[in-house]
Amino acid sequence: MNHLFRVAGALLIPACALLATPAHAQAQETFRIGFVNPDRVLREAQPAKQAQAKLEAEFLKREKDVAGLGEALKAASEKFEREAPTLPEAQRIARQRALVDQDREFQRRRREFQEDLNARKNEELQQVYERANRVVKQVAEAEKYDAILQEAIYINPKHDITDKVIRALNASTASSTAAPAAAK
């Protein structure tokens, strides 16, 4: 029985301490948390769309050139397959070598194109990420958030501030593009 009183006392002391804590002290310790979906920011924010358009314009000609090489290789390969049975051995071997060289060149150009595109894409995305992170920090400070998460298994939609971040990012983009135009 004495043991039961000790256990009950041990449980009541912390409970009483919580009750004795002033209500304003508990209210001051609320922890505000927000969530930002970085994938949505990269899909929907104006700076991300502008970066994508810039990359497409920058790499459009090279992409067409590489696609043209691929089509030329395919056409040459089909032509060779049609004509191969009637070609003399030496000519057939020479055209096979030419096709292998053409394929090697196509693969090299396609790989270089992809590497250059990926490098530029990473550069542009890094700039968008940096701007987005600055905006997230501004929103968090303005609305007094204690923590902003970018990855979570589950987030209650009431904590999702992605729309606010996208609007602020778009507004900052609009004001930064309007400022140089006004200076002209």
Image: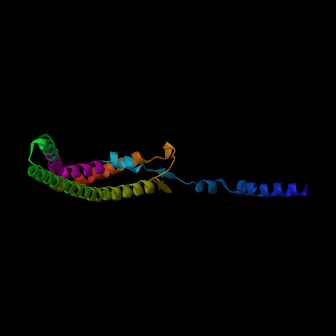
Tell me: residue 158, above or below residue 121: above
Q: Residue at x 17, y 50 (%)?
A: 66
In the displayed orientation, state which residue is furthest to the front: 89
Q: Residue at x 43, y 50 (%)?
A: 36
Q: Is residue 29 left or right of residue 151?
A: right
Quadrant in which the C terminus appears: bottom left
Residue 180: image quadrant is bottom left
* Residue 30 coordinates in the image, percent (x, y): 57, 54
Between 122 and 110, the residue placed more toward the observer is 110
Tell me: residue 17, above or below residue 41: below
Q: Is residue 18 magenta?
A: no
In the displayed orientation, state which residue is furthest to the top: 82
Q: Is residue 144 visible?
A: no
Between 94 and 154, the residue placed more toward the observer is 94
Quadrant in which the N terminus appears: bottom right
Q: Is residue 180 visible?
A: yes
* Residue 173 coordinates in the image, percent (x, y): 28, 52
Range of residues picked out in magenta: 46-72
Tell me: residue 2, above or below residue 44: below
* Residue 83 coordinates in the image, percent (x, y): 11, 42
Q: Is residue 70 left or right of residue 148?
A: left
* Residue 17 coordinates in the image, percent (x, y): 73, 58
Between 62 and 89, the residue placed more toward the observer is 89
Q: Residue at x 35, y 50 (%)?
A: 168
What secondary structure do most residues of the magenta stretch adopt?
Answer: helix
